[in-house]
Image (cartoon, rainbow, N blue to C red):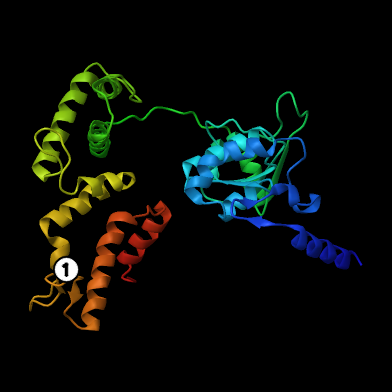
Amino acid sequence: KKEEAMLQEMAEMAESTTVESAGIDEVSFKAQFTFVQEGRSSKQDFERITESARKIMGEGHPLIQILRRGIGVHHSGLQNKYRMAVEMLFRCGFLRIVIATETLAFGINMPCRSVIFAGDNVALNSIQYQQMSGRAGRRGLDVLGHVIFFDVPRHKMHRLMVAPVPKLRGHFLHSSTFLLRLLALDNLVSSQRGATPLVVSRVRNAVSRALSQSLFDAEFSNARLVRSVQGKYILDSFVRRGLVDCEGLPKGLMSLANHLHSTEPSNLALVALLQGGALHQICRKPDGEGWDFSKQPAVWRGGLNDWDAVARDLLVVLSHLFCRERLHSSLTQDAASAARRGLV
């Protein structure tokens, strides 16, 4: 009988609900089909907060529709306007459920009553746990907060709760890719439409101060001189590699190296292989077969078996660049002992 009554209510709601071009009116939602509490926020407030997100994503987007029912999603892959709308709606009490990743762990004020860790992950460490669980229990509103583990091993739960928070120490290094990104930032700000000379000069002064200040883990007397010499050497290497010109403007494969900044130094190694023609040699057989770049789009002139061999060679090269993993010392010792016994 309860199921029949529920189906009858759903049928009545479907008949009474009007779908307009502007979206679904949350007033038509019945209490059992929404998490929105009455009086928390008005329709005008919702439309004002989500205006930018609705323009970008569209009125009929599923992520917009679930906002009307009190559910939000927050992760780094979403539009920035949508994430800002989720944060504002949650703080004003309109949203009651937010499905999020570690993007809510640092620097965002979103206190709640309960936090649920749904599943285990290698990135879930003591710092992430302390930051995420600390949101449970709103100061001045709740006297008790709830932290719930779902599908997390018991031994890891215990380790997360008793493990001390690691001491945060600065490791600010003037790496090659870091300076490359600074050059790209300077060029981006300078080329923006409407960027005044005052804005450009302030950005450059901020970058200069960041490079001149001591943010190293361990400071020494000649650190300023070492940073200066290192920066000049790195910039000279960029000019010789054809990534920037003599005025510091980007050119060539700088955008590729900048896009793969998180994989340093593999990004610079990939650029060197492309510039040196090593990858082109892999894609070209000794008898001249390979890719025919004279046609658009390019076509493969060899047989299927040749293409499989080329794909395998490329996979080996790229995996050595971007998929390297450190093995435990016990595994390397076992491999060495097996090699000595002639088992390998």
Q: Does residue 2 lie above or below 22 as drawn?
A: below
Kindly give the residue lying farthest to the right in the view shown: 1
304 lies above or below 310: below
Q: Which residue is mark 1?
A: 282
**In percent of the image, x 66 and y 47: which residue is there?**
68
Quadrant in which the C terminus is drawn: bottom left
Q: Nearer the viewer, residue 274 or 35?
A: 35
Q: Residues within 10 Å of mark 1 (few under 14, many from 20)?
A: some
Residue 240 percent location from the top left of the image: 8, 42
Q: Is residue 49 visible?
A: yes
From what the image shows, is residue 131 above or below residue 31?
A: above
Q: Quarter of the image holding residue 113?
A: top right
Observer-nearest of 159 and 84: 84
Observer-nearest residue: 288 or 249? 249
Q: Is residue 171 left or right of residue 165?
A: left
- The kind of secondary structure element at disc 1 is helix
Q: Which residue is at 28% across, 58% downward?
A: 320
Residue 163 in view in this figure: no
Q: Position of residue 295 (x, y in %)?
A: 15, 72
Residue found 42% across the figure and 55% down from its top: 330
Vertical order, 258 against 9 (above or below): above
Residue 108 position in % (x across, y down): 55, 32
View extreme (top): residue: 221
- Give the quarter of the image for residue 335: bottom left
The residue that appears at 16% across and 56% down in the rendered structure is 274
Q: Tell me where residue 261 sits by quadrant.
A: top left
Please give left or right for residue 332 compared with residue 189 in the image. Answer: right
In which quadrant will I find the N terminus? bottom right
Looking at the rendered structure, the number of numbered marks drawn on it comes to: 1
Q: Is residue 78 left or right of residue 234?
A: right
